[in-house]
Amino acid sequence: MAKMSAINKNNRRIKLSDKYYKKRKLLKKIIMDKKVSLEERFKAQQKLSKLPRNSSKVRIMNRCQITGRPHGVYRKLKISRIALRQLGLEGKIPGMVKSSW
């Protein structure tokens, strides 16, 4: 099990990212638009830099939903490889069996 402080920090980042998503998207659209004047693009860049760093989607860590483990996480399942194996051994994942030869 991961540290609760790390899990909570990541959850705060997710909330901030959701909160500022539309605002960041609008500012980035202005910054990338070559038709907009240079001054307006610069002002948009300054506004973007004043937003909280943790509101960026890049700072969110993929963590296991069961254990909170940050590494070895399958994106589609949102479960770490260790938790996936454990659930497979318990028979909780249909069609998954432990390989042996």
Image: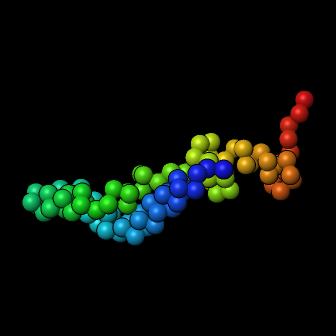
Residue drawn at point x = 83 percent, y = 56 percent? 92
* Direction from residue 83 to residue 28 in the image, left or right: left
Count of marks overlaid on the render: 0
* Direction from residue 93 to residue 51 in the image, left or right: left
Quick one: which residue is furthest to the top in this view? 101
Q: As rendered, which of 82 and 92 lies closer to the eye?
A: 82
Measuring from the top left, give residue 84's x and y in whole percent. Answer: 74, 48
Q: From this view, report whether residue 25 is shown above or below residue 73.
A: below
Measuring from the top left, give residue 34's x and y in whole percent. Answer: 17, 56
Measuring from the top left, give residue 15's x and y in whole percent. Answer: 46, 66
Q: From this view, report whether residue 18 is shown above or below residue 90.
A: below
Report the coloring of the rendering: rainbow
Q: As rendered, which of 15 and 30 lies closer to the eye?
A: 15
Measuring from the top left, give residue 18's x and y in whole percent. Answer: 43, 67
Residue drawn at point x = 55 percent, y = 51 percent? 62
Occupied quadrant, residue 28: bottom left
Quick one: which residue is furthest to the right in this view? 101
Query: Is any atom of residue 21 visible in this view?
Result: yes
Residue drawn at point x = 18 percent, y = 59 percent? 46
> Can you say which quadrant of the picture contains the C terminus?
top right
Q: As rendered, which of 101 and 37 lies closer to the eye?
A: 101
Occupied quadrant, residue 98: top right
Query: Is any atom of residue 41 visible in this view?
Result: no
